[in-house]
Structure formats: structure tokens, C-alpha cells
Amino acid sequence: MGLLDDAVTVLDERGVLEPLGDLIRQVYRRAAERHEPELGDDAMSFGTTVWRNLTNLGKATFDGVDGVRVRLEDNSLEIVCAGYVVRLYSLQGGIESIRWEGSEARLGGAVENSRDGQLAFDDEEQFPEVFAGVLPPKRHIRIAHTGDITTGEAIAYLGLPRDNRDGGSPWFEVKVWFGEPTTVGTPLPIVGDPAELPVQRHDELPIPELAIETLRPGSASGPTAGRVVGRLA
């Protein structure tokens, strides 16, 4: 078996994957049932509903489960079990189109997975037992999910993220977890923590170019007569 199969086996045995998969399917189905374009709903509102429902209900699902630690990291659901760190991300386009550079939190797992000779103990915050054991060689697992606004049909992938800032695939291994890759309909937009979304700063706005003209004497009256003035090009 490969490293991804090893991770799936462990997480399945610990009771993580089945309830998580059920939750993803339920959230998409309910979001589609409540989606009403005539009342102003659109792809972004659909995606935001899915994201927030998965985050809040996911935490409630795994809170208090033996051997599983769940927390909200950067307003996103993170599940830690048997040394593995599972996080969910929405997907737009093909599975190879996903990007990890959107934020430090997104990129961190891919970078750690890509380090050679990775042997470490988990931090005390995640494993208060202190030194819970040697971590899996590639401990970060990512679930990429999307769905159909009309039908509520969901699809999810399981994969080991890879740091591909220098090129290549964003995955070491990835496979379909459930659903049909040929799902049709309006795709889910990329949504997530608003802090991770690009925001244009006022000091980055372009400066308008000015066309400089000189008013000849007698061509204008008033306080600007004979002065050099500028106007927007």
C-alpha cells in the first residue's frame, strides 16, 4: 500500500472518515434544497453556506470523540487523529488545479509533507499526552470537495498535498473518495476564511495619469486663469 492508503486505513479504523463523508454529503444536499436564486442566492452564497456548515457541524461531530482532536484553525475545520492532520478545502475546476499558496495555513501542510526525512513528535497542544509517537512520513491529509447547486450531489477527493511552487502536481497522491467526477451543473466557487481571500488595499490602487495643460491668458477667467492645471487623462 502507498502512504495515502495507509492514512485512509488508519483514519477509517479510528472512525473519522465515515462520519465526515456523511456530513459532507448531507451539507451539500441541504444547501441545494435551501438554494433559492429568486431570493438572491448565487454560487457564492451556496459555497459560503457549505463552508460554514462543514466547519461548525464538523466540530460538533468530533468534539469529545476518543482519540480525535478537532479545532478551528483559521476559521477552517482541522481534525487530528493518530498523528494525521485532516483539513477540508473547496475545489473549483480539476483536482490538479488546486493551489496551496492562498495562505500560510494552506501552504504549511504541503511544505511539511514535502520535507525529506520527516520524523518528529506532535506538539503538546495537539497531543497533551506528550510525545504521542513518531508521526507518519506525510501526515497532512487534504479533502478537496465540490458539488452541484441544483442536485446537491457532492464529490470529494482524498490526497497528500505537495509543495508545488516550483512546478508539478499539487499532490503526492490523490484519489476520488466518493462521488462522480463528471458531476454537471454550476461548480462551487472557492470560498473560505475571508482573511485568506485577496483584498485590494487602498495604497495599491493605480494612480491616475494627469494631462498637463497651460491656459493661455484670456482663455479663461477666474482664479485659475493663466495657471498650469491638470486633468484626468
Image: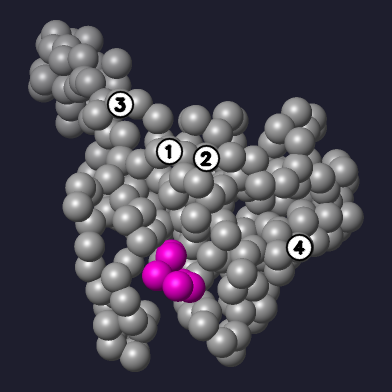
Image disc number at residue 174: 2
State yes or no: discs 2 and 4 in contact (Cβ < 8 Å).
no
Q: CA distance from mark 3 to mark 2?
A: 17 Å
Q: CA distance from mark 2 to mark 1?
A: 6 Å
Of 82 and 192, the residue lying toward us: 82
Q: How is the image coloured?
A: one colour
Label 3 vs 2, first from the N-terminus: 3
Label 2 vs 4, first from the N-terminus: 4
Q: Which residue is mark 4?
A: 22
Of 89 and 12, the residue lying toward us: 12
Name the residue type under label 1: Trp
Q: Quadrant of residue 19?
A: bottom right
Q: In the rendered structure, does residue 96 fall within the stretch colored magenta?
A: no
Q: CA distance from mark 2 to mark 4?
A: 20 Å
Q: Residue at x 23, y 68 (%)?
A: 120
State yes or no: discs 2 and 1 in contact (Cβ < 8 Å).
yes
Q: Within 10 angstroms of label 1, few (less than 14), some, or many (20 or more) residues?
A: many
Q: CA distance from mark 1 to mark 4?
A: 24 Å
Image disc number at residue 171: 1
Name the residue type under label 2: Val
Q: CA distance from mark 3 to mark 1?
A: 11 Å
For mark 4, give the secondary structure.
helix
Q: Nearer the viewer, mark 2 or mark 4?
A: 2
Q: Quadrant of residue 188?
A: top right
Q: Quadrant of the C terminus?
A: top left
Give the magenta part as a residue range: 80-85
Q: Which residue is mark 3?
A: 167
Q: Within 10 angstroms of label 3, few (less than 14), some, or many (20 or more) residues?
A: few
Q: Within 10 angstroms of label 2, few (less than 14), some, or many (20 or more) residues?
A: many
